Image (cartoon, rainbow, N blue to C red):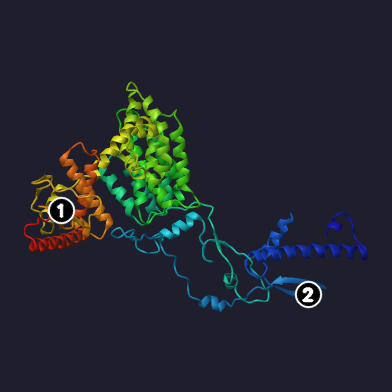
Amino acid sequence: MIGESVGVSSISEDVATTIAEDVEYRLKEVVQDGLKFMRHSKRHRMKCSDLGCAMRAKNIEPLYGFDSAEHCPFKHTTGGSKEYFYPDDKEFELADLISAPMPALPVDATLRAHWLAVDGVQPSIPENPAPSTLEDQKKKALGNDRAQPSDGLLHTKDVRFDKKSKKSSKEEVSSGTEWSKLKPLQAHALSLEQQLYYKEISDACVGISDTKRIESLASLSSDPGLYQLLPQFSSFITEGIRVGMSQRKLQTLKFLLKMVKALFDNPTLSLDRCLHELVPAITSCMINRQVCARPESEDHWYLRDQAAKILAEMCKKHNNSANCLQSRVTRVLLQALNNNTQGLAVHYGALAGLIELGQECITSLVLPQLKKESQYVDAATPSRSTEHQAATKITQLLQRCVAPVILSVQPSLDMLQAYQEQYGSLGLPLYNQVKNLKHARAGIPLQGVAARLQSPTLKSPTVTSVGQLKTKPAPLTLTSPQVSAIKISGKTTPRAQSPISAISSPTLAAALRFVSVSSSSQLASPTALSPSTTPISMSLLSAVINNPAIVSQLSSALSQTNTTASSGSAQDSKTPTTSS
């Protein structure tokens, strides 16, 4: 046809043979590419669309008018010394068409109501979205989930195709293959009910009505069907915090943090896939230089404290080897703490965040920074009211949260000079707080001790009340007096054993000897011992009295000693006996 269009009327046999070979090669190439498209479509029968795709892949204009979803067999016939191929048309009987029943009328559009939730529980009906468990949410967020062959867009690996096999494509693909789900390219569309719920909750959480806000936060913390709305709420909170920071709206920032807390408290939600939005927003509430219009009068410290608590809870719950959340947050807070150009309010937020991460973080990160931090605190003069207020808040924070850690990790550090050398000017308030904690821990519940002293087991005729003794008790020797002797009228008589010597536990015996010596020395001379000895002895006595096992051991030792003393007095009534 192309040759005739340019004036070639006839060609030789050699030229026709050469052209036929080239045409055959081109046809085979197109058919082979069509087979590839057929296999990638998981089919065993080639369609016209496969050849069309193969021709488009080779920049050849595809054929038009032969595209069909079904196989179109052609029939062969001859006429006028020519061959013709035509599709086989199905023949219909007019009688069957006339006698066939009429099709049903189309149904009119109707409205039907269904329950979105019953008593706060979403019923499992086709109209409601399927609830997703917390484990499924975490798997989807981490991207290591495995989908079933019927879900979403799928692709296979190492799939073998056999033309002679008569198995269906689904059976062939599902046997011995690994499936992985591809994430959809388009965003998920929310239903009308979910859009209305999102609008009402977001407006109520940042609105002026306290009642609606409380109800909305309660719904966010307990509703089990919020998984599909979580990205929308995360974007709303992030954008709200950004706008609140730029406009210095402290109240709005507090409301948004309450929304984050409510979503975090929901046991059916996993925030793994929203951490990349929520963590920077919460961190900004902690270490932003100015989060309100009047920092000298507004309570922006509460906002920083709440943000620190929420961020610490997120790190404890969602930290793993994939996101390294806690180490990244710690690095950001340390950078803010080492920056001396942003102001002490930023340092307060960074310290609050590091303290909330736990005792290990305080020991390894906060304590080495305190001497440098004391220089910043000293530089805050009363003339600069905002900085001076921040310095006071930092000192109170360290006294409240860091002093107990110092007492537990450095119990031997008890000199003011050592505190000042290690922590600078902050050493004085920390020393005072640690000293107060030591005295508080050494305190004795007076009513409880008095009640135990009046019990029959420890009843003593020389004790009337706590701290009041009729007679001064004899001091106990710190050596091990198993046998001692007294000399009366030239006669040496063995003295009764001390109850402490009859105690089998050497630790308990040493503790009781220390209590006796310290109490007797304090009564004899108030300046004989250091002021810290009396609280230690009183705390040891309190621990002994409050331990039932030790009390029973003391009772048995006392009764054994009294029996020995009674037998000795019966042998010689003139020989005095002493029980300590």
Q: In this view, does 148 lie above or below 95?
A: above
In the figure, is residue 262 to the left or right of 138?
left
| Location of the N terminus (image quadrant) | bottom right
**Residue type for callout 2:** Thr
Of residues 204 and 424, the one nearer the viewer is: 424
Label number found at residue 486: 1
Question: Disc 2 to disc 1, how far (Cα)?
Answer: 146 Å
Of residues 154 and 511, the one nearer the viewer is: 511
Q: In this view, does 514 lie above or below 420?
A: below
- x, y percentage for residue 313? 38, 48
Residue drawn at 67 percent across, 73 percent down: 162
In the figure, is residue 570 to the left or right of 123?
left
Q: Is residue 362 visible?
A: yes
> Dividing the picture into quarters, in which one does residue 495 lie?
bottom left
**Residue type for callout 1:** Ile
Q: Can residue 346 be seen in this view?
A: no
Residue drawn at 53 percent across, 55 percent down: 184
Q: Residue furthest left?
A: 573
Helix, strand or loop at disc 1?
Answer: strand
- x, y percentage for residue 300? 33, 34
Residue receiving disc 2: 78
Of residues 15 and 495, the one nearer the viewer is: 495
